[in-house]
């Protein structure tokens, strides 16, 4: 009887929002998973349930340390590189640390993956790379100039990945995430993402503050769409799909006013008093782009990407999770 080969994937940033969701999915799919995290933004409670799984190993380390990277890739077939310091405002306040993690750390992981002869390196890129490009929808081959230090770091990642593909033969795929949301996303901290922050504020009858007039729009992308995209990028056998970048989104856009309206509707079904919470409007945030909408045609054509969750469908799932876990 032929023995099934079990693949091993390293997930950097494995205790973070996206990383821990990917870990859960790949473990459930029968993969061996190694998680690498320094817990600067990730949380131990995100990986607690995995620690008893014989197919899971946690390495507490930092991608800025090449020794930690080399240790993490030992015996690994594939890498899902999620570790990064997110947030445009954080990068504006502290560009040096953002660059150290997102550029130097990324380069460390590429070198470690090259030296370990990793089969494929899939990494979290960002829609911020489109910068001041005004055309909609965003198409992978047309970008503008970056509008923040964070955006610069994510664009540099793409350039380094391309060089490592051409120079060293390392298979790479970059996934330009568009406003990912869902279970396990942290609502706390100065740089919390807008959806979990708004949900927890509304649950406590606090007024959410929208930057600007609420007409800025985003391609909000539910976590299960992102998981599908990572799996397809990691397992695709299409040679034409390699060594490039893909938009990872739903392919629709909603304004922040639309978002809050949906949140209030779904939350007020659980607590009618939430319907009466007022929304507050503030100033626009530095480095923000007005509108974002992804073309997902390239991912559909080359990877077979077929996202199942619209903003509304994803919000219903996310609101239920937050209600049960954070109330």
Image: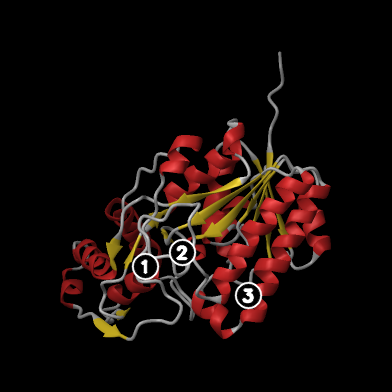
> For mark 1, does the 10 Å Cα neighbourhood hold few (<14), some (14 to 19), or many (20 or more) residues?
many
Check disc 3 and report its element: helix, strand or loop.
helix
Q: Residue at x 43, y 58 (%)?
A: 183
Q: Earlier in the sequence, mark 3 or mark 1?
A: 3
Percent x, y of residue 262: 23, 63
How is colour applied across the structure in the image? secondary structure
Outermost residue, top direction?
Answer: 1
Percent x, y of residue 48: 59, 58
Above or below for 7 versus 140: above
Percent x, y of residue 152: 59, 70
Closest to the camera, between mark 3 and mark 1, is 3
Q: Residue at x 46, y 76 (%)?
A: 188
Residue 13 visible from this viewpoint? no
Q: Residue at x 19, y 66 (%)?
A: 268
Relative to 24, 136 lies left or right = left
Give the spatial CA distance, label 3 vs label 2.
20 Å
**Callout 2 touching callout 1 (CB < 8 Å):** yes
Relative to 4, 314 lies left or right = left
* Near-viewer residue (252 or 322): 252
Residue 185's label in the rendered image is 2
Give the spatial CA distance, label 2 vs label 1.
9 Å
Residue 195's label in the rendered image is 1
Residue holding disc 3: 98
């Amino acid at each position: 009887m032929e023995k099934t080969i079990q693949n091993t994937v390293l997930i950097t940033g494995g205790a973070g929002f996206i990383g821990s969701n990917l870990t859960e999915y790949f473990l459930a799919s029968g993969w061996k998973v190694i998680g690498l995290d320094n817990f600067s933004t990730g949380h131990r409670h995100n990986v607690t349930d995995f620690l008893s799984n014989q197919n899971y190993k946690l390495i507490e380390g930092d991608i800025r340390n090449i020794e930690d990277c080399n240790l993490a890739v030992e015996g690994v077939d594939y890498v899902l590189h999620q570790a990064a310091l997110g947030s445009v405002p954080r990068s504006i306040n502290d560009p040096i640390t953002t660059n150290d993690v997102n550029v130097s750390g990324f380069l460390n992981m590429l070198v470690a993956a090259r030296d370990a002869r990793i089969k494929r390196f899939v990494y979290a890129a960002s829609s911020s790379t489109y910068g001041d490009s005004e055309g909609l929808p965003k198409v992978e081959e047309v970008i503008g100039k970056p509008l923040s230090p964070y955006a610069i770091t994510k664009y540099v990642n793409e350039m380094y990945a391309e060089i490592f593909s051409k120079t060293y033969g390392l298979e790479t795929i970059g996934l330009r995430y568009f406003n990912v949301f869902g279970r396990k996303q942290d609502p706390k901290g100065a740089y919390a993402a807008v959806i979990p922050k708004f949900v927890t504020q509304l649950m406590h009858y606090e007024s959410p503050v929208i930057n600007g007039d609420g007409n800025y729009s985003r391609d909000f992308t539910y976590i299960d769409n992102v998981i599908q995209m990572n799996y397809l990028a990691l397992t695709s056998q299409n040679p034409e799909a390699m060594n490039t970048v893909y938009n990872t989104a739903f392919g629709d856009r909603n304004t922040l006013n639309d978002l809050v309206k949906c949140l209030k509707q779904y939350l007020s079904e659980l607590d009618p008093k939430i319907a009466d919470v007022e929304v507050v409007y503030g100033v626009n945030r530095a480095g923000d782009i007005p509108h974002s909408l992804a073309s997902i045609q390239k991912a559909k054509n080359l990877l077979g990407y077929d996202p199942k969750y619209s903003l509304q469908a994803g919000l219903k799932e996310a609101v239920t999770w937050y209600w049960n876990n954070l109330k």
